[in-house]
Amino acid sequence: MKTHRLALIPGDGIGVDVTDAAMAVVRQAAAGRFALDTETFPWSCAFYHETGAMMPEDGIETLRRFDAIYLGAVGWPQSVPDSVSLHGLLLPIRKAFDQYANIRPHRLLRGVEGPLKAEGFDILCIRENTEGEYSGAGGRVHPGRDNEVATEVAIFTRKGVERILRFGFDQARARRGHLTSVTKSNAQKYSMVFWDEVTRELAAEYPDVTVSHMHIDAMAAKMVMAPQDLDVVVASNLFGDILTDLGAAIQGGLGFAASANICPDGSGPSMFEPVHGSAPDIAGKGIANPIAAIWSAAMMLEHLGEVEAAADILRAVESATAQGIGTRPGSHSTDEITAAVLAAMATCP
Ligand code: NAI
Ligand code: MG
């Protein structure tokens, strides 16, 4: 039997509750199929208070030994600035392991009522996670004077653009065969025209995938008006950031939004996490929706090659939501939703 080594970082607030829920589901899905070797790391804002750092100095080297990383949520803004918690843990992990593909499935689960009539809404958003508008290149000159200047330079490399698009084409091939590339090449005439060119070059290698080119503004409208026409969506760091919040809203909110930070060549572990944060407003109340976390764990199992276990989990989640469990904020506790998923998994063939 194969053994998967998982590094668990529950983090802060509801991150801890939803990680427990997701791991209970993963353990049941593993039974009879594969073994798990998990290690839990207490890296969090509490850890920061104790040690002065979000993770130990050798944290990255420690994580490198694992097959995958699962993260709940990190942040406790009352006592640790978000810039510290983000730059001390999440961002270094994404960077160290070159997790350049941030992927988020947006789908309306049965029984969930989103704000739109979006039946058949089922898309995979792929956001470039390492460069583009969030490269950090730029500067400020003449601070505080009336001629003050601030620049923020978007960096698009051939390597970066090509690899994220290639990842998107591969995903489209494995899904419904359609890829939408999102740019703003009418206004941004260097970087986005370049992006369009690379898309066309790669499209020639994927004759079985149909390609649409959309501008970000039109794309925002399309996601509201006809989201069911989309399949795989590939976008730059900034555009992907915005579109995935829209996608999460259409699918019913943060309680349902799952994500993965993938290192596609496997040179480092990939990281799986719900999109939501530590939700200090509901932390400790036992009412966090664990579905986003459970779905993220299913993505992790799929990435590890446990395709059947992953599919079982998603079927069980949808069987629970179809009965109205976990579909409205506060209607069920974290434990009740988790129990419903576990029960559905036990009865599904
Ligand atoms: P948040 O996602 O934690 O919460 C936003 C709102 O959504 C809150 O009202 C919360 O109660 C609700 N919510 C979120 N997840 C929920 C769930 N599973 N079930 C039910 N309701 C849920 O975002 P916020 O408040 O802006 O950030 C709180 C902390 O989390 C900050 O420190 C922030 O930096 C951090 N954060 C961490 C992330 C990560 O670890 N990847 C991602 C986003 C925020
Ligand atoms: Mg965002």
Image (cartoon, grey):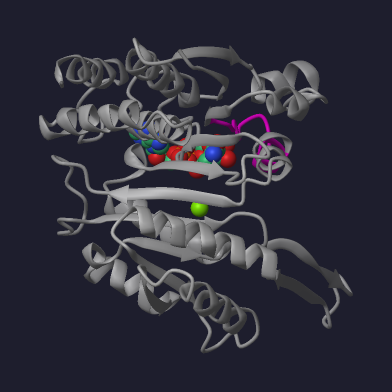
> Which picture quadrant has residue 291?
top left
Residue situated in front as seen by the camera: 140 or 1: 1
Could you tell whether 55 is left or right of 269 in the image?
right
Residue 17: x percent and y percent? Answer: 43, 19
Q: Is residue 119 visible?
A: yes
Residue 264's place in the image compared with 79, above or below, is below
Q: Is residue 270 above or below residue 175?
A: above
Report how many numbered discs are placed on residues in the image. 0
82 within the magenta span: yes
The C terminus sits in image quarter: top left
From the top left corner, tell me how far across and down residue 63 is, in percent: 69, 26
Residue 241 appears in the rendering: no
* Residue 124 picture location, percent across and down: 37, 54
Residue shown at 61% from the left, 88% from the top:
189
Of the 4 image quadrants, the one containing the N terminus is top left
Snapshot quadrant of residue 215: bottom left
Percent position of residue 185, x then y: 53, 84
Front-most of residues 157 and 131: 157
Residue 45 sits in quarter: top right
Location of residue 118 with respect to 1 vertically, above or below: below
In screen coordinates, is 57 left or right of 65? right
Q: Residue furthest left?
A: 323
- Give yes or no for residue 105 being in the magenta stretch: no
In this view of the protein, which residue sits in the foreground, 105 or 349?
349
Compared across the picture, whether 67 is left or right of 146 comes to left
- Residue appearing at x 38%, y 59% in the figure: 172
The residue positioned 41% from the left and 36% from the top of the image is 299
Residue at the (36%, 32%) spot, across then down: 307
Tell me which segment is drawn in magenta: 73-87
**Going by the image, does 337 lie left or right of 70?**
left
Q: Is residue 167 above or below residue 110?
A: below
